[in-house]
Image (tube, rainbow, N blue to C red):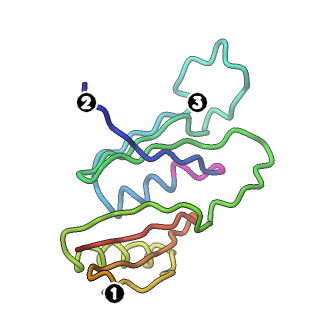
Amino acid sequence: MAHTIATYIALPGTTAEAMQHWHEVFGGDLMILRYGDMQLEGMPFEPDPEAVAHATLTTSAGIIAGGDSIEDGNDYAVRDTAYSMLYTTDTPEEARAFIGKFVAGGGNEAMPFEQAPWGGWYGQVFDRYGVMWAFSCE
């Protein structure tokens, strides 16, 4: 089996919505498993049956995985610049189209997508869930 690395993100009860939105933006295959769909015997906690235990969005560019945070009182901020999802496209037009879908879906552009000092193209957008998406193109 080949090794892979996937991005995993825990959201405060919005994982299903976020994954469905990202599926609308990027396409691919979406799988969402809720705690109510699983056998919960022996679990050290009692989760909401509607909470997302595990979800994956498999696209031609890679895999995004995640689940709902099960801890009560999460006070960490999802919206931050300490991390981002970096998506590299073949053309600037593809990146602009993805950014446009995020903005149309309630996100906001954080850094305009334009030619960068290193010669490529780069820009950032926050989606409506507070996740920063950076787009890059040579």
Residue placed under numbered mark 2 in the picture:
2
Horizontal side, residue 7 vs residue 138: left or right = right
Tell me how far mark 3 sits from mark 2, CA to CA. Answer: 29 Å
**Callout 3: SS:** helix
- Closer to the chain start, of discs 2 and 1, is 2
Horizontal side, residue 35 vs residue 112: left or right = right
Q: Position of residue 20 (x, y in %)?
A: 43, 54
Tell me how far mark 3 sits from mark 1, CA to CA. Answer: 42 Å
Q: Position of residue 14 (x, y in %)?
A: 59, 53
Residue placed under numbered mark 1 in the picture:
114
Q: Are marks 2 and 1 in contact (CB under 8 Å)?
A: no
User: What amino acid is at disc 3?
Assistant: Tyr
The residue lying toward the viewer, choosing from 121 and 78, is 121
Which span is picked out in magenta? Answer: 12-16
Q: Residue at x 78, y 43 (%)?
A: 72
Q: Residue at x 47, y 75 (%)?
A: 125
**Callout 1: SS:** strand
Q: Residues within 10 Å of mark 3 (few under 14, many from 20)?
A: some
104 up-or-down from 131: above or below: below
Q: Quadrant of residue 89?
A: bottom left
Q: Residue at x 62, y 66 (%)?
A: 80
Residue placed under numbered mark 3 in the picture:
35
Q: Position of residue 35 (x, y in %)?
A: 58, 30
Q: Residues within 10 Å of mark 2 (few under 14, many from 20)?
A: few
